[in-house]
């Protein structure tokens, strides 16, 4: 009988590759720090984004923000997991603003995978990155 493990690895490898391809499209002429993000929704759809810098620094967009915007444009509103790709050996964590943006469409237990071109370097839950988060449920 075949194990489910190879299928999971193949799927994860495709997700990592999607984040890597997104990072390759980043527009980062000022920081030289390309980032790619891939969001997986509850129904298995994937959406990617890359960072897009601007000479007026606050006007740029993070990869996570771009992937979330693509997800919302497609009518989705729930993040099942997110893969963030950087060139760092240890993988880069999302900025504070992106942590809050992820939280808007996720919950404390949502997996966040920090990746380098070699693969997943760290597997966290969103609560590890944003403890005691304020989410939309507090406004209801």
Image (tube, helix red, strand yellow):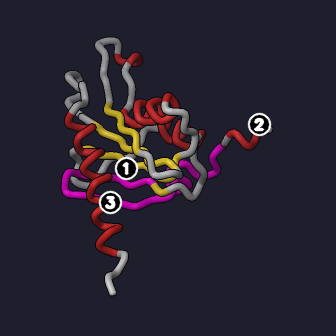
Q: Nearer the viewer, residue 2 or 138?
A: 2
Range drawn in magenta: 112-134
Please tell me which of labels 3 and 1 falls first in the chain.
3
Q: Position of residue 21 (x, y in %)?
A: 23, 41
**Distance CA(mark 3)–CA(mark 1):** 10 Å
Please tell me which of labels 3 and 2 falls first in the chain.
3
Q: Position of residue 29 (x, y in %)?
A: 20, 22
Q: Quadrant of residue 135?
A: top right
Q: Which mark is residue 83?
A: 1
Asked which secondary structure carries label 2, the reply is helix
Q: Residues within 10 Å of mark 3 (few under 14, many from 20)?
A: some
Q: Quadrant of residue 56?
A: top left
Q: Horizontally, is 24 left or right of 49 in the view?
A: left
Q: Residues within 10 Å of mark 1 (few under 14, many from 20)?
A: many
**Residue drawn at x 38%, y 31% as measured from the top left:** 62
Please tell me which of labels 1 and 2 falls first in the chain.
1
Check the image and report above or below for 85 versus 127: above
Identify the residue at the far bottom of this view: 1
Of the 4 image quadrants, the one containing the C terminus is top right
Q: Horizontally, is 56 left or right of 31 in the view?
A: right
Residue that numbered label 3 is attached to:
12
Check the image and report above or below for 131 versus 135: below
Residue that numbered label 2 is attached to:
139
């Amino acid at each position: 009988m075949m194990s489910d493990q190879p299928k999971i690895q193949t799927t994860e490898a495709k997700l990592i590759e999607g984040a890597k391809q997104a990072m390759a499209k980043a527009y980062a002429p000022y920081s030289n720090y390309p980032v790619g993000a891939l969001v997986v929704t509850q129904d298995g759809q994937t959406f990617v984004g890359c960072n897009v810098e601007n000479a007026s620094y606050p006007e740029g967009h993070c990869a996570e923000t771009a992937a979330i915007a693509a997800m919302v444009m497609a009518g989705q509103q729930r993040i099942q997991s997110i893969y963030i790709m950087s060139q760092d050996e240890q993988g880069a964590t999302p900025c504070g603003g992106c942590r809050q943006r992820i939280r808007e469409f996720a919950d404390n237990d949502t997996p966040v995978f920090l990746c380098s071109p070699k693969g997943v370097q760290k597997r966290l839950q969103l609560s590890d990155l944003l403890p005691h988060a304020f989410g939309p449920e507090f406004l209801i």
